[in-house]
Amino acid sequence: MASPVEELKYEKSQLLKKYIEEYLNGNETLFHENQDAIMFIDLNGQIVKVNQAFINLSKYNSKEVLQLKLQSLFPLECLERVYHYFYKASLGQFQNFDCFMRDRNGQMIDLNIMNIPISVENEIIGIFSVAKDITELKRKKAEVRKIENYHCIFTENVSDIILSTNFIGNILYTSPSCKSILGFTPEELNGQHISMLLHREDKEKFFSDREHLLTRLESTRGSYRFLKKDGNYIWMESLCKPIMDDGNIMEVVSVIRDITERVKVEEELWNGRNAFFSLIEHSPDAVIIAKDYEIIFINETGVNLVGAAKREDIISKSLFDFIHPDYLPLAEKRLKEIINGGPSEFAFYKLVLLDGTIMEAEIKAIPIHFQEKTALHIIVRDITEKKKTQQLILNSEKLSLAGRLAAGIAHEVRNPLTAIKGFLKLLGAELNNHAYLEIIKSEMDRIESILTELLVLAKPQDLKLEKENISTLIEEVKTLIDTQAILNSIEIEIVNDDPNLTILCDKSQLKQVFINFLKNAIEAMPEGGTVTIEVKRSDVHKVSILIKDIGVGIPQPILKRIGEPFFTTKENGTGLGIMISKQIIENHNGSVHFYSNENGTIIEVRLPVTEGF
């Protein structure tokens, strides 16, 4: 015969079954299709009813499940916990707890269980238990905790600053390394706006980069100066990344690294590179970098040397485009030898400039390494001025030699010449035929004239400088030469822009110069015409006197040699007149220039004007 307690439990078990039937009549679909496992358990811990989700979870079939009690489903270490909460639920308390359940195959499943007491007429007749599989949730939480631990270890020990800001730029988190780098503790920075750390000159760039990050949702990298607690600034590189949630920016995480030393090194390298390129760019010699004989760089001197308007006119051209055809085989041979380790030294070449002009130059090529390939650093030196200087030195030596010779010759010849002229006068008084004597006398006068020029060359006269009006001087010269000009059907015309210009000069010597130049102009115009003397200022401190004829002109090869000692194209010339004239002009701190073509010749004399005019 059953005990009263057992009879009571039996009655409650029957009430529970009746309750389940009534519950299912209205909630059968909700019960069977629920994603969570549902169990009806009587007060003895016997499973009375389960849904399909529980069968799927436990791997027991529907018959096996109804034979199970709670102790059959849970491992020994969880039973005490399970029965503790089961007992509280039987007393009418709602209970929620986590525990492990063992399925039919022995696999452990992590569950969250909610026990709801079932009450009928204020009597607890069973337990309605809902079990949720939280195995995956627990695994993800464990991973999150692991990541958080790693993050904590990383942020607390990394040498860079980890800094998190919200959308508007307020600092949410600062790693402890901030203290050692900037001197601020995290507590001093958290809650502050990021702009407080930035140098005022870098704020615009920083917020421009941040706007790019917020609008394009892309990571950004930038370098800025950050404030230290002691008031100094250091260079920091910041890598910023937006943290998203459902398409919205939750925060911006930045890794900030001290790059002060790197910036200093880069500045030193940059300054060194700038100094090197400045040295090349402003070199008096043309500098060319060529790879595979193709020009990839040329300095400004080189651009001007070849007659280009801009660098782009030269870049990508071949080196051999500028080598004279006569020197191409030599250039190709020498460059190959240099690339293969041969000696590098200056060599003479002729170059062809962009306008076709031939130029003489000294060229040196040095092999260098550029973009992982061998290239050539080429120095081109224009030797035009050098050759002119050499020629001037040679002419000077000739002039010095000529002076010494002239002094000796003039003195040795003049003495017997004086005696001869005296005896000719005596003979002239005794002879009736004076024709031959006149010829002899004319030739003797010419010899004496040459001797006078030789003596001027040997011992230039001392300058007697006085202030003279240039217009007056030119008018006097015109008066002296007019007779010879008229005899040759030539008109001399004076064009004077400024009649008040004065110069400091030896008047007689300058007259000699201008008469010499005008005689040459008259001789260049056998058919007659007009010789123009133009006086004008060439600049603030100098006056130009231009003597222009309309003769046949002087060929360029001859024009280059004008002024050389003993060089002349005249049948009876000495080759000393122009040279002496140039010397007189140079003694007056002036210069003389010759220009000529088929339409005539221009001689330009430049002299300094006196101060105050």
Image: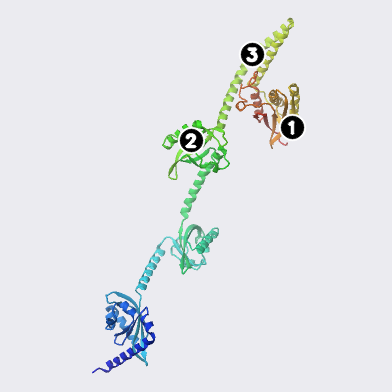
Which mark identifies residue 413? 3
Q: Position of residue 355 (x, y in %)?
A: 57, 36
Q: Amino acid at mark 1?
A: Val
Residue 445 shows up from this direction = yes
Q: Is residue 402 above or below residue 76?
A: above
Residues under numbered marks 1 and 2 in contact, where contact means CB atoms less than 8 Å apart: no
Asked which secondary structure carries label 2, the reply is strand
According to the image, what is the colour scheme of the structure? rainbow
User: Quick one: 429 or 296, which is closer to the camera?
Assistant: 296
Badge 1 crowding class, 10 Å Cα cut-off, few under 14, some 14 to 19, many 20 or more, is: some
**Distance of label 3 from label 1 (alpha carbons):** 44 Å
Residue 405 place in picture, x, y as percent: 60, 18
Q: Are marks 3 and 2 in contact (CB under 8 Å)?
A: no
Q: Between residue 583 and residue 366, name the one nearer to us.
A: 366
State the mark number for residue 364: 2
Do the residues bearing badges 3 and 1 touch, measured as CB atoms within 8 Å?
Answer: no
Mark earlier in primary sequence (3, 2): 2
* Residue 62, quarter of picture: bottom left
Specify the amino acid type for callout 2: Lys
User: Would residue 581 be found to the left or right of residue 335 on screen?
Assistant: right
**Mark 1, residue position:** 495
Q: Is 464 on the left or on the right of 7, as rendered?
A: right
Q: Where 274 falls versus 608 (above or below)? A: below
Q: Dot 3, crowdedness within 10 Å: few (<14), some or many (≥20)? A: few
Identify which residue, 300 or 453, lies in the foreground: 300
Q: Nearer the viewer, mark 3 or mark 1?
A: 1
Residue 542 screen position, x and y as percent: 68, 34
Q: Amino acid at mark 3?
A: Val
Helix, strand or loop at disc 1?
A: strand
- Quadrant in which the N terminus is drawn: bottom left
Vertical arrangement, residue 44 with respect to residue 497, above or below = below
